[in-house]
Image: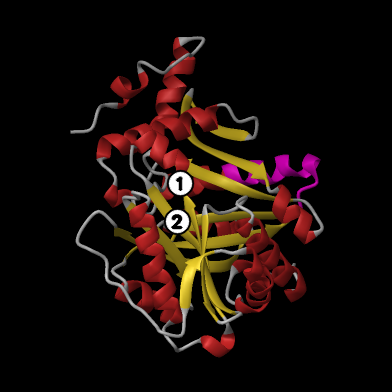
């Protein structure tokens, strides 16, 4: 059985008054309605309580946190933060609504969330924010309807898959003509060429505020940072002779490991050269990546792909993943 909220918070609260403590407990309750990691079903409930506590403590300390109260009771909270990396590529300031939390009753949540979003957009103005994104679960109709009412447009839909790695031995594929291994410096140019052309269904290419060149350069820069170790813990590359055929980037989720005691990894970016598609390169890369993660004592791995990318979804299911969450990304121009 999970610990009660008061039991979880008691050792950690450093409130200046009982009112502060009460509001923090209420914020913790609202965290229960906020999406946990997509692979939450792989994490013990008590560990999820620690994760929610960590989120509540982080959000409570944010300067960019707005709250809605009625009769002294906290009804909801929303936070946002600037996106320096996105802003640099877009050429104008961008930010993200990191959470939109309210009670799970549809009617109440719509009213509260709309007030929160209105306040967030108002407070973004002094920072010169022009591009504001928000992501919510496809099951959260109240949040979806509020985002649309507030002038946010749907940009992207992501299906997220997960699988355990501490079970039966992983399947292995092989190809006599294809070598798969961790990134080597000579492969960088080939990786960047693929990254500049492979992505078409993502939220950056779907955004009318950005031209295709910006989105292409953004992905190339993302891969360069991944290969240098800034944006990924590992890059797995498939090659033939001196030609790069595809890649997978992986990140270990350190915060989840710290708070939940579960070593979770995310497959972040996957791409295959256009002429190499249909040859099993994606499956070969995925299975080798899973084996590397298993060797690194990772307990579970998650991966997301666009709703429109049906072949990728089938690939992950064939590699032992199962679909467990669908999310939608919205954008508003301020």
Query: Image height check: is 326 above or below 256?
Result: below
Q: Which span of residues is magenta-colored?
A: 116-130
* Residue 54 percent location from the top left of the image: 44, 31
Query: Image height check: is 295 above or below 58?
Result: below
Label of residue 140 in the image:
none
Residues at circles 1 and 2 in contact by the CB criterion of under 8 Å: yes
Q: Nearer the viewer, residue 69 or 279?
A: 279
Q: Which quarter of the rendering shows the N terminus?
A: top left
> Gap in Å between the C-alphas at discs 1 and 2?
7 Å
Residue 109 appears left or right of 155: left
In primary-sequence order, the first of circles 1 and 2 is: 1
Residue 128 drawn in magenta: yes
Label of residue 253 in the image:
1
| Residue linked to disc 2 | 266
Badge 2 crowding class, 10 Å Cα cut-off, few under 14, some 14 to 19, many 20 or more, is: some
Q: Residue at x 68, y 67 (%)?
A: 220
Badge 1 crowding class, 10 Å Cα cut-off, few under 14, some 14 to 19, many 20 or more, is: some
Q: Nearer the viewer, residue 174 or 48?
A: 174
Q: Nearer the viewer, residue 130 or 196?
A: 196
Q: Residue at x 37, y 63 (%)?
A: 290
Q: Quadrant of residue 204?
A: bottom right
């Amino acid at each position: 059985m999970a610990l009660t909220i008061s039991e979880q918070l008691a050792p950690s609260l450093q409130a200046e008054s009982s009112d502060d403590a009460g509001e923090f407990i209420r914020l913790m309750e609202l965290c229960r309605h906020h999406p946990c990691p997509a692979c939450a079903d792989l994490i013990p409930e008590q560990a999820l309580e620690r994760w929610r506590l960590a989120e509540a403590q982080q959000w409570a300390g944010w300067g960019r946190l707005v709250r809605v109260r009625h009769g002294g009771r906290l009804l909801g909270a929303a936070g946002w933060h600037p996106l320096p990396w996105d802003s640099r590529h877009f050429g104008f300031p961008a930010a993200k609504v990191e959470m939109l939390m309210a009670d799970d009753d549809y009617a109440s949540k719509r009213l509260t969330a709309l007030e929160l979003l209105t306040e967030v957009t108002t407070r973004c103005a002094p920072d010169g924010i022009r591009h504001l994104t928000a992501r919510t679960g496809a099951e959260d109709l109240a949040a979806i309807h509020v985002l649309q009412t507030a002038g946010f447009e749907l940009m992207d839909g992501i299906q997220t898959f997960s699988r355990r790695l501490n079970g039966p031995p992983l399947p292995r594929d092989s190809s006599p003509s294809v070598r798969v291994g961790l990134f080597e410096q000579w492969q960088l140019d080939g990786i960047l060429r693929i990254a500049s052309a492979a992505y078409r269904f993502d939220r950056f290419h779907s955004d009318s505020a950005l031209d295709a060149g910006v989105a292409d350069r953004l992905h190339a820069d993302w891969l360069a940072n991944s290969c240098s170790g800034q944006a990924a813990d590992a890059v797995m590359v498939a090659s033939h002779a001196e030609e790069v055929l595809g890649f997978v980037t992986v990140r270990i989720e350190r915060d989840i490991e710290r708070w939940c005691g579960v070593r979770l990894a995310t497959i972040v970016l996957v791409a295959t050269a256009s002429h190499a598609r249909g040859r099993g390169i994606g499956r070969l890369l995925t299975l080798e990546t899973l084996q590397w993660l298993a060797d690194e004592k990772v307990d579970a791995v998650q991966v997301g792909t666009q709703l429109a990318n049906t072949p990728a979804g089938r690939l992950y299911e064939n590699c032992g993943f199962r679909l467990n969450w669908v999310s939608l990304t919205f954008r508003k121009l301020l």
